[in-house]
Image (cartoon, rainbow, N blue to C red):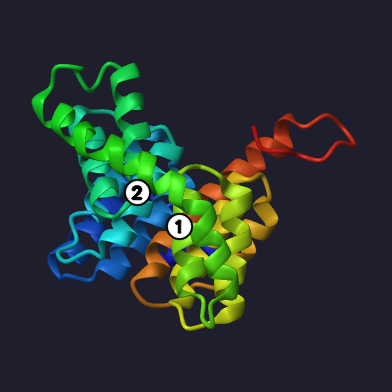
Amino acid sequence: MATYRTAGKPIPAPWYDKAISLAMQGGDWAAVSQLYGERLSVYPSTPNWRSALANIMDEPKLDPQVQLDLFRLQAAVGALASERDYQNYATLANGAGASAEAQTVIAAGRAAGKLPVAQPATAKLLLTAAPKAKKDIAALPALAKKAGAAKDGAAALAVADSYYSMAQYPQAVEYYRMAASKGGVDAARVNTRLGIALARSGDYAGGGQALAQVTGGAWSGVAGLWRLWVGQRAGQSAAVAPAGASATAS
């Protein structure tokens, strides 16, 4: 593989697959994420994204918050493809306190024909998610006000996460920045989600810069994969922008 990299030639996909398999067998999940990132930079098809993310999420004891951002990435690349994908994503989101997001995922799964309306597990999940989402949305303005007066960034991080889970990305950016400035929070988590929220708002350059600051620990793998998505989206946006115009997100 080193020879191909030095020569600037694309490494054959089966070579990546073999290296990834060995890394998984050895429990080196950081290497798994890195290798999948390299593979996706060369072979970025939607099925390849789905396969990569599904395998990365096989990591034992994966942080649920990290896993949630992997599911979000799977949705962003259009790689939610089965009942299991939607069901697992919605269940995880609801369990992580993102009930409004769980509702959105269920609605998307049903619209895509992947989650039957009469499916018992989904119907049961929606019964718990819907009232909680309504309550969380109603409480958010008061929580946001308290976050501004708090001594550390924990409350601001919670508010930012709520806004992000509702796809209100500019508001999420504001509170992630507040959380970072107040301190007392996991900087890797904040920078990862700040970068994602910026990119989802259309600021690919700012998003990439924030994600690039996540260089170690449990969040580095997901940040690297989101950074790859940001680069690909920025390239697509630039390719379709009229001459002399700035690229913007769709």
Nearest the viewer among 174 and 113 is 174
Q: Where is residue 161 in the image (x, y as percent from the top left)?
A: 45, 57
Residue 49 in view in this figure? no
* Residue depicted at x 32% and y 60%: 65
| Residue at numbered disc 1 | 161
Badge 1: few (under 14), some or many (20 or more) residues near its Cα, within 10 Å? Answer: many
Q: In this view, does 25 lie above or below 183?
A: above
* Residue depicted at x 34% and y 17%: 111
Q: In this view, does 248 lie to the left or right of 47?
A: right
Nearest the viewer among 64 and 36 is 64
Report helix, strand or loop for mark 2.
loop
Q: Position of residue 223 (x, y in %)?
A: 46, 62
Residue 128 in view in this figure? yes
* Residue depicted at x 55% and y 44%: 168
Q: Position of residue 92 (x, y in %)?
A: 24, 48
Which image quadrant is residue 112 in?
Answer: top left
Which image quadrant is residue 67 in?
Answer: bottom left
* Residue depicted at x 18% and y 36%: 125
Badge 2: few (under 14), some or many (20 or more) residues near its Cα, within 10 Å? Answer: many
Say if mark 1 contacts mark 2, CB within 8 Å. Answer: yes
Which image quadrant is residue 119 in?
Answer: top left
| Residue at numbered disc 2 | 98
Q: Which amino acid type is marked by label 2?
A: Ala
Report helix, strand or loop for mark 1.
helix
Q: In this view, does 4 lie to the left or right of 233?
A: left
- The single residue placed furthest to the right in the displayed view is 244
Q: In this view, does 141 lie to the left or right of 28?
A: right
For marks 1 and 2 on the same chain, the one whose residue lies earlier in the sequence = 2
Q: Which amino acid type is marked by label 1?
A: Asp
Nearest the viewer among 72 and 95 is 95
Cα distance in 3D space between marks 1 and 2: 8 Å
Please identify the quadrant where the N terminus is shown.
Answer: bottom left
